[in-house]
Amino acid sequence: MDAVFHIPESSAGGVHAERLLTLHQAAEALGLHYWQLQRAVKRGAIPSYTPFGRKLVKLSEVVAYINSCRQGGGDA
């Protein structure tokens, strides 16, 4: 996923505000179904923001949640 999407990082000494996306935009960007993301937000697994009455998410937080759910694949 990291190769496809660049997650913005804060620059040296500066504060970088990450763009908030609608659930539809985030789901489309990651190739997910809207309802999958909606359920994760409703469960509280992914933080959401509602500054103008519309649920928004940070792409980096969605990717972090997906990575935290990763199982196997390691050299054991």
Image (cartoon, rainbow, N blue to C red):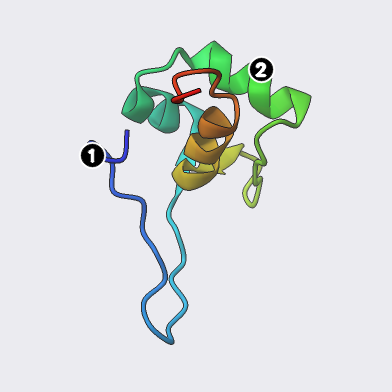
Judge the density around disc 1: few (<14), some (14-19), many (≥20) Cα neighbours within 10 Å: few
42 on left or right of 26: right
Circle 2/circle 1 CB separation < 8 Å: no
Give residue 3's mark.
Answer: 1
Q: Earlier in the sequence, mark 2 or mark 1?
A: 1
Q: Residue at x 46, y 25 (%)?
A: 74
Q: CA distance from mark 2 to mark 1?
A: 26 Å
Figure check: 28 above or below 10 = above
Who is closer to the viewer here, 39 or 75?
Answer: 75
The part of the image, by quadrant, that contains residue 27 is: top left
Where is residue 46, by image quadrant?
top right
Q: Position of residue 73 (x, y in %)?
A: 44, 19
Image coords of residue 57 (percent x, y): 55, 41
Q: Residue at 56% x, 41% y: name it.
A: 56
Within 10 Å of the Cα at label 2, are there few (<14), some (14-19), or many (20+) other Cα atoms? few
In the picture of the structure, the residue carrying the numbered disc 2 is 39
Callout 1 amino acid = Ala
- The N terminus - image quarter: top left
* Residue at image point 55% right, 19% down: 71
What's the mark number on residue 11? Answer: none
Q: Is residue 43 left or right of residue 46?
A: right
Q: Residue at x 45, y 59 (%)?
A: 18
Helix, strand or loop at label 1? It is loop
